Amino acid sequence: MKIQLINTGKTTEKHVKEGVGLYAERLKNYVLFEYIDLPEIKHAKSLTFDKQKELEGEIILKKVLKTDYVVVLDEKGLEYGSTEFAAHLQKIMNRGIKNMAFVTGGPFGFSRPVYDRADERISLSRMTFPHQLVRLIFIEQLYRAFTILNNEPYHHI
C-alpha cells in the first residue's frame, strides 16, 4: 500500500519540516509514503475565501486518482483515539486499497467537490490547529498507528 499526505500549500515552518522529515523517514519501515505539498494559490489574498477553496480544490482533485481512497482531515470529521485510528487503518488496508491519500486543506477548509470526492473525513481534534502544524500532528499519528499495528513500544497504553 502507498500512503500520501497531500497538503494545500507549502510547508514553510522550519520545525514542522524537521518533524515531518523525521516521521516520513520512520514511516518507510512500514509503508510506501509520499509527502506532497501542492502549489500555493497565486494572489490568494485578493480572492474571497470561497474562491480560494475552489482553486485549492481543483489542484487537490488533479492530484488524486479515481482509484485512490481519499480521506480529508476536517474539523467535522470522525475523531479516533490512536489505537482506534490504527485499527481503522488496518481495516482499510485489509480491503486491498492500493493507494490512500490523506489531504490537509487550507485555512478555510475544502471546496464542495473535494468533500464529495472524499471517501471519509477524519478530525484530529475538536480544537483548532494551524494548518501547518496539522501536517506534523497527523504524520506522527500515522507513524504511531503503524507502531501500534506492529506491537512496537512507541505507543504506551
Image (spheres, helix red, strand yellow):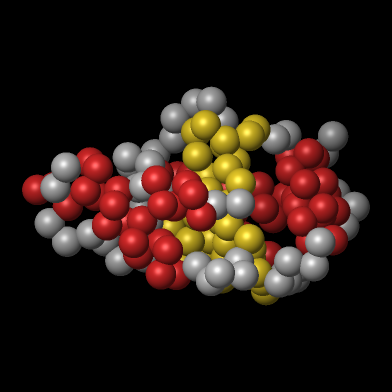
Compared to 148, does 20 lie above or below? below
- Tell me where residue 103 appears, x and y as whole percent: 50, 54
Q: Residue at x 60, y 66 (%)?
A: 68
Q: Which residue is at the far left?
A: 46
Report x, y in % for residue 118.
54, 52
- Image quadrant occupied by the N terminus: bottom right
- Residue 27 placement (x, y as % from top left): 68, 65
Vertical comparison of 75 with 115: above or below: above
Horizontal side of 5 relative to 91 (left or right) equals left
Q: Residue lying farthest top?
A: 126
Left/right placement of residue 53 relative to residue 125 reads: left
- Name which residue lies at 17% across and 61% down: 42
Query: How many numbered discs sit on the rendered protein?
Result: 0
Instruction: Quarter of the image for the C terminus: give it.
Output: top right
Q: Can residue 59 be seen? A: yes
| Percent position of residue 28, x then y | 69, 71
Q: Is residue 52 left or right of residue 58?
A: left
Residue 10 visible in the shown view: no
Residue drawn at x 78%, y 39% as measured from the top left: 84
- Residue at screen point 73% across, 34% down: 81
Residue 53 vs residue 13, the one in the foreground: 53
Q: Nearer the viewer, residue 108 or 112?
A: 112
Find residue 98 and report its image quarter. Answer: bottom right
Does 80 appear above or below 33? Answer: above
Which residue occupies the extreme right position in the image? 151
Q: Is residue 92 above or below residue 47?
A: below
Q: Looking at the picture, tell me which residue is in the foreground, 107 or 58.
A: 58
